[in-house]
Image (tube, rainbow, N blue to C red):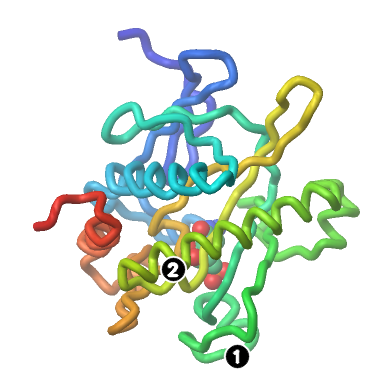
């Protein structure tokens, strides 16, 4: 088979040219990194699980009219996606204090936040993805103010939906990161969800025990990382019962 043209290789995913113009193939690797590459490893089977989990969540978001880049899953590790112009921001949505906000503001991990908080980080590995404000985003024209409004609205709707979906599976959605991209439909530009939604970029805690079921198991050397991702998939009804 002819080798497809690789467009981009990230820490956990590779993008290849797609079969039709305006499409890409997103390949999910088992590689895992934390602390912007300071810590590296392999979680066997992670790519397969994240491909399925992201497919499942994005399909459900599509069903409630949240536009996403997901088109269809191709095989165990690959999905067909729409090619987008990535907006260079990581949009973090937080419901419960954990990770960097807990450290930065001296909050105890697990404290419910007074309201959902959205934060923006500038996507730039060499700068360690610094946190930025709406002022920076407008001044450097990373996103127009109305585009940022649209991203906020989509992020909040995504949060409402995913919180409910995970709650039904006995999982608390503590926080997560989204990325958005621009697509052009005729003259019109639309903003759609891109990247992936998986235990790599969400904090998911067992609602009863607060046990971590996400990448923090790798970041904090808690062990049983693959098992935790599998359990997320199983509770969402993606994997058959063991
Ligand atoms: O580390 P921090 O607490 O800021 O992370 C918030 C959320 O964003 C977590 O769910 C984390 O997995 C996700 N995140 C990510 N990619 C990054 C930084 C954070 O997916 N580069």
Labels 2 & 1 near each other (Cβ < 8 A): no
Q: Nearer the viewer, residue 103 or 143?
A: 143
Q: Residue at x 46, y 14 (%)?
A: 19
The residue singled out by tag 2 in the image is: 203
Q: Tell me the quarter of the image containing the N terminus.
A: top left
Q: Residue at x 59, y 20 (%)?
A: 22
Considering only vertical position in the picture, is 25 above or below 47? above
Q: Tell me the quarter of the image containing the C terminus.
A: bottom left
Query: Residue placed farthest to the left in the image?
Result: 242
Q: Nearer the viewer, residue 187 or 11?
A: 187
Q: Is 221 displayed left or right of 138 in the figure? A: left
Where is residue 113 drawn, in percent x and y? 59, 84
User: Assess mark 2: CB under 8 A from ligand 1?
Assistant: yes
Residue 164 placement: quadrant: bottom left
Q: Is 21 displayed left or right of 58 in the figure? A: right
The residue singled out by tag 1 in the image is: 106
Of pointers 2 and 1, the one earlier in the residue sequence:
1
Q: Judge depth for marks 2 and 1 and give the one in front.
A: 2
Query: Residue placed farthest to the top in the image?
Result: 2
Q: Secondary structure at mark 1?
A: loop
Where is residue 43 drawn, in percent x and y? 27, 53
Considering only vertical position in the picture, is 106 above or below 19? below
Disc number placed over residue 22 in the picture, else none: none
Residue at mark 2 to residue at mark 1: CA–CA distance: 19 Å
Q: Residue at x 51, y 76 (%)?
A: 99
């Amino acid at each position: 088979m002819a080798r497809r043209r690789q467009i981009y290789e990230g820490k956990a995913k590779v993008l290849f040219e797609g079969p039709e113009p305006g499409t890409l193939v997103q390949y999910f690797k088992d590689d895992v990194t934390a602390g912007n590459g300071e810590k590296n490893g392999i979680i066997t089977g992670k790519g397969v699980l994240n491909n399925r989990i992201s497919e499942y969540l994005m399909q459900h978001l599509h069903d409630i009219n949240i536009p996403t880049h997901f088109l269809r899953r191709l095989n165990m590790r690959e999905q067909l996606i729409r090619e987008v112009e990535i907006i260079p921001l990581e949009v973090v949505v937080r419901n419960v204090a954990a990770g960097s906000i807990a450290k930065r503001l001296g909050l105890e991990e697990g404290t419910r936040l007074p309201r959902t908080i959205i934060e923006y980080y500038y996507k730039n590995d060499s700068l360690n993805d610094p946190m930025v404000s709406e002022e920076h985003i407008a001044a450097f024209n990373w996103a127009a103010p109305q585009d940022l409004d649209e991203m906020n609205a989509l992020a909040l709707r995504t949060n409402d939906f995913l919180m409910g979906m995970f709650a039904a599976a006995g999982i608390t959605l503590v926080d997560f990161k989204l990325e958005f991209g621009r697509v052009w439909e005729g003259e019109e530009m639309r903003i759609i969800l891109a990247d992936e939604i998986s235990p790599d970029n969400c904090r998911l805690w067992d609602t009863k025990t607060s046990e971590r079921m996400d990448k923090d198991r790798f970041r904090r050397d808690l062990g049983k990382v693959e098992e935790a991702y599998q359990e997320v998939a199983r509770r969402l009804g993606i994997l058959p019962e063991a």
